[in-house]
Amino acid sequence: MLLVEDDHGDAFLVAELLREEAAPVQIRRAQSLHEGLDLLGAEPFDCVLLDLGLPDASGLDALERLREAAPHVAHLVLTGDRDAQRGIDAVAAGAQDYLVKGSVDGDGLRRAILYAVERRQADSVRQQLRAAEILAEEATRLERGLLPVPILNDPALLVGTGYRPGRERTLLGGDFYDLVHTRDGAVHLLIGDVSGHGADEAALGVCLRVGWRTQTLGGVDVEHVLPTLHQVLVHERHAEEIFATVSTVTIAPDRASAMVRSAGHPPPVLLGDGHGGAPIIGPTASGPPLGVFDDVRWPARELALPERWGLLLLTDGLIEGRAAVGRSERLGMEGLIALLAGIDAAASWADEPSTLVADLIEEVLKLNGGAVLDDIAALLLTGGRGAT
């Protein structure tokens, strides 16, 4: 305990009362506010017992400055027998309790100190719980923005999605996805990942996703969508080193082909009855990530779709985990293809895309031995030729 008391007699009395009670309290004394602030900055304390009548402070100034210097420490104040109102005012200003000089015995002083410390610790726990609640509420809001409900009006098309946070955070990162079915019959897919982690990156991911959906619903030529998202990122990011990888896919109304554009993002995976039925890796990146270079274009690469197909879009968290527990090698795209081939043989992915996505993520986590470092996001759309 730090005792801030300029009167030697009162300081001696406090020490004697606690000694007689064998109280588990070690006392360090300061004779002025200035000296007390120096000690608070140099040593850890659980409690401050403050005389409000210091020579270098007036009113509640000393209490305010001590609480500002050590907000997590319990504060008790000492007042004269005619200054009880000052003690009440001190409690209103943040002190845990007040004591009137000459009106407290050793047991009362011991109890007041220990109770003040316990109350301050309880207050800290409540503050931490509230902060955790606010963080959870923020994560929920960000999740709604990053992982929306797809706009899909064709019953012949089915969609499955999955998201798992990385183990290094409790807050969503910058992974996002979206799907929009437009009036011309085309289906547009998006998946992306903002570099870094935290609320700022997640909010930027929301901006990019909403910007993409707005342009897509507004009928903007798909060739101009990624350049516009690049501009959005450049103007919205909080640091110049922030970038985003993004992949967009436009499936033709006849469902026979898809146009893939990738800004430094992992390629999609094609499932279907072509190529011997094995999953294949789609077109790789057609340009750098958003936010890296100006005046860049991301040309489309065509992907032919078989009679019955599935398109899996993913973020790199799905492929950067370990290939097996205890091994250092990463799973990678080839390892992911092997996992998909095994799952595909046991699951009806065309009719239950959500099941395949869930099974795939579980297999990736099992191989990694638990949660991966980065977030995992996946979007699987299944359909066939002639769907409308």
Image (cartoon, grey):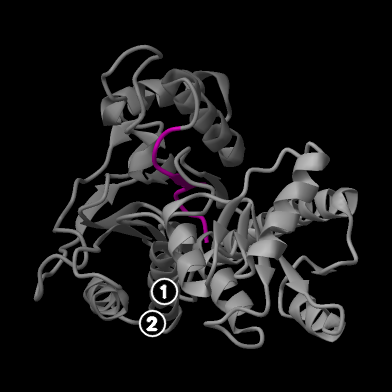
Q: Residue at x 85, y 50 (%)?
A: 106
Q: Which residues are magenta?
A: 372-388
Q: Residue at x 79, y 36 (%)?
A: 22
Is 375 a magenta residue?
Answer: yes
Q: Is residue 39 left or right of residue 159?
A: left
Q: Amino acid at mark 1?
A: Cys
| Outermost residue toward the front in this view | 9
| Outermost residue toward the top in this view | 326
Mark 2: few/some/many CA within 10 Å (<14, 14-19, 20+): few
Pointer 1 residue: 207
Above or below, 265 against 38 in this view is above
Q: Quadrant of residue 38?
A: bottom left
Q: Amino acid at mark 2?
A: Gly
Is 33 a magenta residue?
Answer: no
Q: Which percent across, then down, holds residue 105?
A: 89, 55
Q: Say whether residue 220 is visible.
A: yes
Pointer 2 residue: 219
